[in-house]
Amino acid sequence: MRDLTLSGDPDEALVARVGRGDHAAVQTLVARKLPRMLQLAQRMLNDAAEAEDVAQEVFVRAWKQAPNWKPGGARFDTWLHRVALNLCYDRLRRRREQTMAEPPEQVDTGPAPDRGLLARDTGVRVTAALGALPDRQREAVVLCHYQDLGNIEAASLMGVSVEALESLLSRGRRALRAALADLRE
Amino acid sequence: MSAMDAQRFETLAEAHGGLITRWPAAEQDAAYAWLAEAPEAAQAVLSQALALDEALDVLRPPSPSTALRDAVLAAAPAPARPRTLARWLTGAGIGAALAAASAAGVVVGVQVAQAPTEASSEAAVAVAVEDDWILLPDGENQS
């Protein structure tokens, strides 16, 4: 069972122990948050190696932050998400700059021996559909669906109103449904 | 409870998926009420949203590799070391040595002050120049 404190942050006591150099608390925090941060980065970047780099950097910053963490503001989990998202957007921006400098080769859309196989792989299809979403729609879907954040927390993280988040989610999910329509046939 | 109708129900399902438990907390009671009021239409909306949820859930959370976990742990703050008896004794020993040295210094200082020497009549003054100490005869000191 997680500690519940007056601030309502289930990680508050754990972070305080991490800040005091408690090794057991460090291991618990890693077990609790590393998979979440890795998933967030993986869904945002669609690149396993880059996602690992981001997750690792998030924790480098968390270790620095823990001794100075002041309860009562944002939840620690929300702060971790903010750091991870900033790192993801840095990488997405760099990718765009590189793409503009070096335009990608034309993708062959003709039939290929393994194309039918890939089409049957739902995971590949979903990954591709998520990757094709505009960044902000993907961020909204990732935060609410995969990271299971509430609408108020997700909207706050994204710096938008709850209504704007709802709009991003609707448009994102509509695009996903269209891209994956044949999977349900 | 917030107002709910078919359109709002559909909008919420489209944005938040087919599980009402994942919808905004402030609208869940109204959504359940609508589900009871118009079960057939509401269930159809939820089923369509659930189909997309299930497709998205095909992607399982990635498991961190051992190498990543080790790298993250390696960068963590060093474990706080418990204060053992040996460390306490070491600390106490250093303290005792410092106290003894301090006491010896006081004794020597008192003896020097009580024994005038020839050097004291020439009044050499020590001035600090960066890290070095220089002795200058009296009268050659400049500010």
Image (tube, helix red, strand yellow):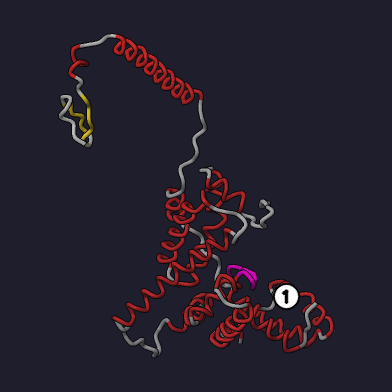
Task: Residue lying at the far right in this picture: please name it.
Answer: B37
What residue sits 77% from the left and 87% below the top? Answer: B5
Side of B5 where A88 appears, left or right: left
In the foreground, B94 or B87: B94
Side of A90 where B23 appears, left or right: right
**Please, what secondary structure does the residue beneath circle 1 have?**
helix
Task: Residue lying at the far front in this picture: please name it.
Answer: B139
Place of residue B133 in the rendered image (x, y in percent of width and height, measured from the top left)? 21, 29
Place of residue A167 in the rendered image (x, y in percent of width and height, measured from the top left)? 60, 84
What residue sits 48% from the left and 65% below the top? Answer: A84
A1, above or below A105, in the image: above
In the foreground, B83 or A28: B83
Q: Give the residues in magenta.
A: A146-153
Quadrant hosting residue B142: top left
Q: Which residue is mark 1?
A: B20
In the foreground, B51 or B119: B119
Q: Is residue A40 magenta?
A: no
Place of residue A153 in the rendered image (x, y in percent of width and height, measured from the top left)? 62, 69
Label 1 neighbour load within 10 Å: few <14, some 14-19, many 20+ = some
Quadrant hosting residue B135: top left
Label 1 resides on the chain identified as B
Quadrant hosting residue B16: bottom right
What residue sits 37% from the left and 79% below the top? Answer: A96
